[in-house]
Image (cartoon, rainbow, N blue to C red):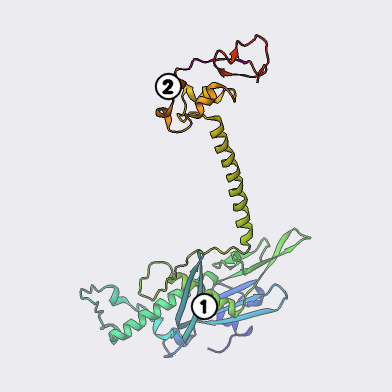
Amino acid sequence: MPNLTSATLPIALGNTFGNLEDSDPTHYNYMGAPILSKDAVFGQSANSSFVFVISYRAPNDDVYRFIQCVTMDAKYNAEVEYRNGFQSIDVNVTDEKPLNASPLVVSSLFYDLMNSEPRTDPVKFPTQYGNKTENEILDLMHGAQVLAMSDAMVYCLSGYIQQYGLEAQQIEDTMIHQTPLAVNIRNDTNYRFTDVRFKLSPAVIEELMQNTTLSIFNDATHWTQTMVNSISYENRYIFKEPERLIGSYAVLLATYLVFATLGLVAFVQNGVAADSGVFLQVLCATTNGNSILNKLAKQACLGGSVNHPRELLDLEVQFGQVKEDKDLAAFGTAAEVTELKKGGSYR
C-alpha cells in the first residue's frame, strides 16, 4: 500500500467509516482507523499488510500530521530486572517483517477447527478445509495471535473526534482523549475547552505497541521456560567516619565504668546485706555511718543470709535521733539513738 497522505486519506477513511458524510481528516480533531487494501479483502493479492493510520495535530502548531503504522511479526528479546522492588525491562526487537493480511482476512478461517474434537496428544488439527497442511494452519494461528495483540492497541486508538468541546462534539469509538497523550486546549475567554491536540509520533506508537505486547506476555496466562538469573545481595555497612561511632561508645563505656566503680565503693562502705527485699537490708541502709550496726553490716555485705553474723541478727535496734548528730534520724542501738522529738526536722 502506498504512503497515505491528506489526499488519499479521505478515500481510505471513508471506506472504514462508511456512515460519515465527511471523511476529510482535516475536518476532525483526531481520526484513526485500521485499513485494508481492496486486493487483500477480495483475495486478489498474496501479500498485503495490516495498516493503521492516524490523523492529528500536535500541541505546538496547527499543522495536520499523518502516521501510517504497519503490523509487524517480530521476535522480542526482553531482559527483565528486579532491583529494590522495581521492575525494569530492556527490549530488543529483531526479525521484523510485515504480517501478511491476505490469508488472515478469509471468512471462517478456522471454521473446521472450531467444530473439530481432536483427541490426540499432541493435538492433530484437521487439514481438509482449504487444503492446508498442519504447519500452514499453525502459521495462520500464529498470525492470528499477533494480529490480536495488535488489535488490542489499535482498537483503543481507532475512531474519531470532531468539534471537541462544543455542544455538537462527536467522540466515536476511541479512548485516546482519555490518555496522557491528549492535551486539551482551553479558551479562557469562553471558559471551556475548544480543541484537543496529541503528543504522538511514530516512536510513541511503536513504544505503545511494545508495552501492549509485553503486558500480554506478563499477564500470567502464558507459561514458558526461560533462563532466569537470580542475584542475592548481602547487606554490608561501611562507616565513612568511624571515629564518631568509636567516640560515642567510648564515652558511654567510660561513664558506665565511673558509675560502676562508685557503686562498688559505696556498696563496700555501706555494708548492705546481700539479701534483696528483706527488712535487714533496709535496716542496714539507714544507719549512721560509724554505728555498731553499720560495722556489723559490713561483715554481711556478701554471701546472702548465710553470712549474717549472730551479733547482727540478735542486735536490738530502734529508729531515732542519732546522739552524735542531732539532725540525723537512723536505725541504731539504744546507746546510739534517742527518741524522735515531735515537730523536729531530720535528714
Kind of residue at badge 1: Pro
Residue found 51% across the figure and 77% down from its top: 34
The picture places residue 171, in percent across and down from the top left corner, at 59, 65
- Which of the 4 image quadrants contains residue 102? bottom left
The picture places residue 175, in percent across and down from the top left corner, at 56, 66
Q: Name the residue that disc number 2 marks.
A: 310
Determine crowd level at label 1: few under 14, some 14-19, many 20+ residues with C-alpha closer than 10 A.
many
The picture places residue 136, in percent across and down from the top left corner, at 32, 86
316 in relation to 203, above or below = above
Mark 2 vs mark 1, CA separation in Å: 110 Å
269 in relation to 192, above or below = above
- Which of the 4 image quadrants contains residue 221? bottom left
Q: Which label belongs to residue 113?
A: none
Q: Overall secondary structure of the magenta stretch?
A: strand
**Residue segment shown in magenta:** 315-322
Is residue 304 within the magenta segment? no
Give the side of residue 38 with respect to residue 31, left or right. left
Kind of residue at badge 2: Arg
- The residue nearer to you, when weighing 320 against 180, is 320
Is residue 319 within the magenta segment? yes
Q: Do residues under tags 2 and 1 come within 8 Å of each other at their CB atoms?
A: no
The secondary structure type at the circle numbered 1 is strand
Residue found 67% across the figure and 63% down from its top: 165
Most extreme residue toward the right is 189
Q: Name the residue that disc number 1 marks.
A: 34
Most extreme residue toward the top is 342
